[in-house]
Amino acid sequence: MSERMRSVRLDPEWLLFNPTGDKAWVREKFDDIPRYLFRVYTPKSRGITDSVWTKSMDARLGSLIPPDRDIFARDNDRQVASMLHRHLNWWMGHEDNLVSWTSSLLFAIMYIFYLHASSRDGSAFDNIFLCVVDTADFPRGVFLRDMDLIDAYLAFDGSLKNFRNLRLRKHKSHSGSYYFGEYFSQGALRIEGKCQVVQAQAMIDRGLYDLQPEFRDFAEWEKQLYPPPWAEPVLRLREEFYQVGVERQRISTKELEAVMNIADLFSPRWRLPLAANLIAFRPRQRRDIGLLSRFRAASFTGLSLQALCNEIILIKTDNEREDWSPMRTKIVAYSTLPEVQQYRVIMQEVYQDFCSIKIIGQLKEIPEIPPFSVAI
């Protein structure tokens, strides 16, 4: 079978990236995909997303190039590079077969406020939605990091090199850089049963503003002709992660209640990663016992204390429990994503706490050995 034939999508539920030839090195990057990715959308998005499908603009509207053709199977590399550059800059064009995701929930939340204030969209919060997918439910090659696709086509568009440099450039007055953990899928992707969608207004009603005071200010941005400056606020919010010599604080009771209330919008399999991501909006103190004990509570897990003693925490079966180990749950935390680094720390601590409880439970099950006696 030819390389071209292998690049054609055989399953209508997804379109795999299939780099070949001098781009075959990209295949190695398929193993660097975070387990959870986020996407924010409205009915006015150029593509279309709901709880069943997410589709690119081309898959939704059609184009001269069939939207079920892998980007790496296209003949004109310069045309692909140009499309990629337009997509990254959110410029309108006659074709776009990419769909954007992010590993940063903080960035996704900021995009909600951007869409609300944008004159191009301007949707009300009850018409803006957050979608989270579990990438472990999809075949290898469904998702690809933006920087890897940029590197694959860098030689065919000088503007891509400039954009790549922007992604890595340190801000002139802030400590961070303009990198936001972007990933792509392409064409049409069936996400039914592999995602959860919640309404932005529902998260606001359950305390989203309590997690970051500036969120309330962002929500009041007036609609304007020019796009709101949403990238700069993300960098500003990240700044406290870079402060040296400042003691990190424990999460407050008010913040923790907001986290648990928002997490309750999600079904059980999503609650832990969503709660950990919400907590990671700000730098947190390590080994916060109050936080870890709350993750064990029946009010969050829906499980009884007896269940916890029987080695069940947050997840209901051995297979699911094992999924939270670092070997099963991929978290790609680049140094340019301090909020994702914080999320990784929280997930590691929750898993370590789970392991400690498991060991204690097993020790309790060891029968007592009667004292050794010698007959005289």
Image (spheres, rainbow, N blue to C red):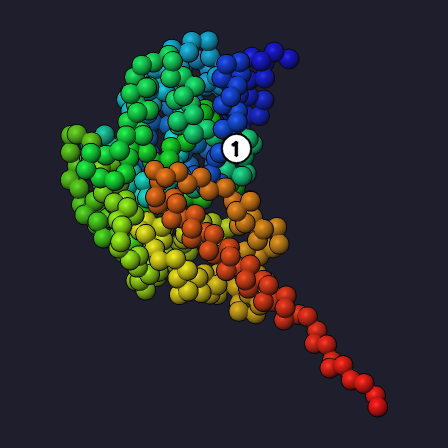
Q: Secondary structure at mark 1?
A: helix
Q: What is the number of callouts on the image?
A: 1
Q: Is residue 126 above or below residue 182?
A: below
Q: Nearer the viewer, residue 323 or 11?
A: 323
Q: Quadrant of the N terminus?
A: top right
Type of amino acid under label 1: Asp
Q: Residue furthest front?
A: 376
Q: Residue at x 42, y 9 (%)?
A: 76
For image coordinates 59% across by 63% down, the residue present is 359
Given residues 318 and 111, the one toward you in this image is 318
Q: Kindly tell me whether residue 40 is visible in this rendering.
A: no
The C terminus sits in image quarter: bottom right
Q: Does residue 276 appear in this view?
A: yes
Is residue 93 positioned above or below 130 on the image?
A: above
Q: Is residue 129 left or right of residue 351?
A: left
In the rendered structure, the answer to whether residue 77 lies left or right of residue 20 reads left
Residue drawn at x 50%, y 50% is 269
Whole-percent x, y for residue 163 in the image:
30, 23
Seen in the image, is 149 located left or right of residue 22?
Answer: left
**Residue depicted at x 57% and y 53%:** 321
Furthest residue toward right: 376
Residue 224's quadrant in the figure? top left
Q: Which residue is mark 1?
A: 31
Q: Position of residue 265 (x, y in %)?
A: 41, 53
Residue, far top: 75
